[in-house]
Structures are given as C-alpha cells and as structure tokens.
Amino acid sequence: MELMVTISIAGILLGVAIPSFTSIISSNRLTTYANELVTALNFARSEAIKRGMQVTVRNKGASTHWESGWNVFVDSDGSNAFNDDGDAALCELGEDCLLRTYDALSIGYTLTTGGSVYKDYAAYLSNGTSKSVAGDTFRLCNGTDKTASRAIIINAVGRVRVSTGTASCP
C-alpha cells in the first residue's frame, strides 16, 4: 500500500514537472543559439580589427534564413562571398581564409533577418565597424512562440545585443 502511494505521488510530481522542464530546455537552446550568433559576430569584428581586413559572417542557407548555419571568414577581396581556389593550401594570398564554421540549428528553430541588410551576410571592416550603414535584427524562434524567442540586434556601427521576445516569429 505504501509503495502504491509513493508511486502515485511520484507520478503526479512528474506530470507537473515534465512540461516545465521542456520549456526550460527550449529556453536554454534559444539562449545557446543566440549566444553562438553573437559570438560569431563579435569574433568577426575582433578579427577584422586584428587582421586589418574585412571579415564576413555568411549564412549557409537561403537568403534571410540563417538556421542552416554560418561561416566566418577573412574576405580578402571584399566580395562578401567565400572564395577558395580548391587546392590543399589554405589561406593563400588572394584567397579567403575560413576562420570558423557554425552548424545548423535543431529542427523547429528558425533564425531570420528582419530586412535586407543582413539577409546573406554581415561584414566588418578593418576599423571594426559594420560594412552596412544600417542596423538590422535577427529573430530566433522555436515555432511561433513569441514569448520564448530572442532578438539579436545589430546597430548601424555593428555592435550586437540580445533581447527576449520579438515582434513576430515565422
């Protein structure tokens, strides 16, 4: 009898705790993905200053949809596209140098830009400022839940900040 009461209480507690635990996991994933993008952008900015060259963060997916991942590379010709001659030697004179690559987000998570400024890439010049003269906002969502979403905002100078909740999710 005592065992049945204990199992019943444990079942009730699990029934209450599991939905809360699921939302905590989702929130932690959103925070992790937002931090990965912020880290990539800050890394690109610091490398541009350190190397005295343009460094670009370019998405691996379709325009405005960044959930397929992104690459950070030294953009030696300023074309905003990764150019490599395909031989075994990396980072030769005149070709771009891949610094880091970031994997795709989990299924169900979306990362989109708000406009046309950073639809394919975000680039930083040798002085640390953004190549673009206007800011933009990335929206990181898990489905259509606006309350648990993140907005990654890049101002006109290129500084990045994160806020919780966005105006819309796809």
Image (spheres, helix red, strand yellow):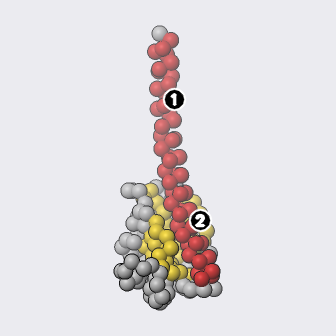
Q: Which residue is mark 1?
A: 13
Q: In this orientation, which residue lies closer to the viewer: 57 or 74?
A: 74
Look at the numbered disc 2 and give the secondary structure of its residue: strand
For residue 79, which quarter of the picture? bottom left
Within 10 Å of the Cα at label 2, are there few (<14), some (14-19), or many (20+) other Cα atoms?
A: some
The disc labelled 1 sits on which kind of residue?
A: Leu
Residue at (61% x, 68% y) in the render? 161
The disc labelled 2 sits on which kind of residue?
A: Val
Whichever of callouts 2 and 1 sits on the residue coming sooner in the sequence is 1
Can you give x and y, in whole percent of width and height, for residue 17 in the image? 51, 35
Can you give x and y, in whole percent of width and height, for residue 140 in the image? 48, 63
Look at the numbered disc 1 and give the secondary structure of its residue: helix
Residue at (49% x, 50% y) in the render? 26
Can you give x and y, in whole percent of width and height, for residue 23 in the image? 50, 46
Residue at (63% x, 85% y) in the render? 127
Q: In this orientation, which residue lies closer to the viewer: 127 or 114?
A: 127
Image marks 2 and 1: residues in contact by CB distance under 8 Å: no
Q: Which mark is residue 162?
A: 2
Q: What distance separates the C-alpha of mark 2 from that of mark 1?
A: 34 Å
- Above or below, 77 against 87 in this view is below
For residue 160, which quarter of the picture? bottom right
Residue at (48% x, 31% y) in the render? 14
